[in-house]
Amino acid sequence: MSIHASVTRGGASGMLDGYLEALALVERLHRLLLDVIKDEFERVGIIEINAVQALLLFNIGDNEVTAGELKTRGYYQGSNVSYNLKKLVDMGYMHHQRCEIDRRSVRVRLTPRGREIRDLISALFARHADGLIATNVIDHNTLEEMSGTLRRMERYWTDQIRYIY
């Protein structure tokens, strides 16, 4: 018997079912976002960079950060940040240099080539925002409400990590 089946028999099945559906949607939406970026790259002929790396460039934007800050600032969600940073530096999308104060720390920032990718992703997202409104998929108020709900969920999960273990 799955955990889902045993818990739903316990009583709070409506909430649990909704929670599990929301979790599945968040996961699917993230994968779809990566596919949308991949499709855009195929459309414009960019083949050497993947969607995860492109999102990293987009999220860094004009900032200069350390590798450690990428996760703490929410710029990177994956587990292999060092690999992707090295690839982006090797391909000329990012500059890196050792921090003068702490030689163990490396600071990274986008190169002009990296900013081109950031701008491409930014334009893609702007087209999507316009398309969502034009096709009445979602309005600004609903989007703000949804974002607020997701932020509360994020805080709840963060609290679970910090205070339960």
Image (spheres, rainbow, N blue to C red):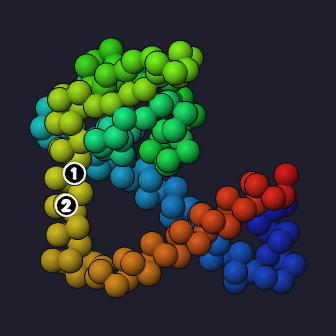
Which quadrant does the N terminus fall into? bottom right
Residue identified by numbered label 1: 122
For the question of whether residue 82 can be seen, the reply is: yes
Residue 131 shown left or right of residue 103 in the figure:
left
Say if mark 1 contacts mark 2, CB within 8 Å.
Answer: yes
For the question of whether residue 87 can be seen, the reply is: no
Q: Position of residue 19 (x, y in %)?
A: 64, 72
Q: Relative to 158, does residue 131 appear above or below in the rendering? A: below
Residue 94 shown left or right of residue 116 in the figure:
right
- The kind of residue on which mark 2 rests is Ala
Residue 116 shown left or right of residue 80 in the figure:
left
- The kind of residue on which mark 1 rests is Ser
Q: Which structural element holds mark 1?
A: helix
Query: Viewer-proximal residue, 98 or 149?
Result: 98
The residue shown at (25%, 19%) is 92
Q: Relative to 47, does residue 41 appear above or below in the rendering? A: below
The residue shown at (37%, 83%) is 142
Q: Residue furthest front?
A: 101
Task: Categorize mark 2 by other alpha carbons within 10 Å: few (<14), some (14-19), many (20+).
Answer: few
Which of the 4 quarters of the picture holds residue 18? bottom right
The residue shown at (24%, 57%) is 125
Residue identified by numbered label 2: 126
Q: Which structural element holds mark 2?
A: helix
Q: Position of residue 164 (x, y in %)?
A: 84, 58
Q: Relative to 163, does residue 86 appear above or below in the rendering? A: above
Q: Position of residue 106 (x, y in %)?
A: 47, 22
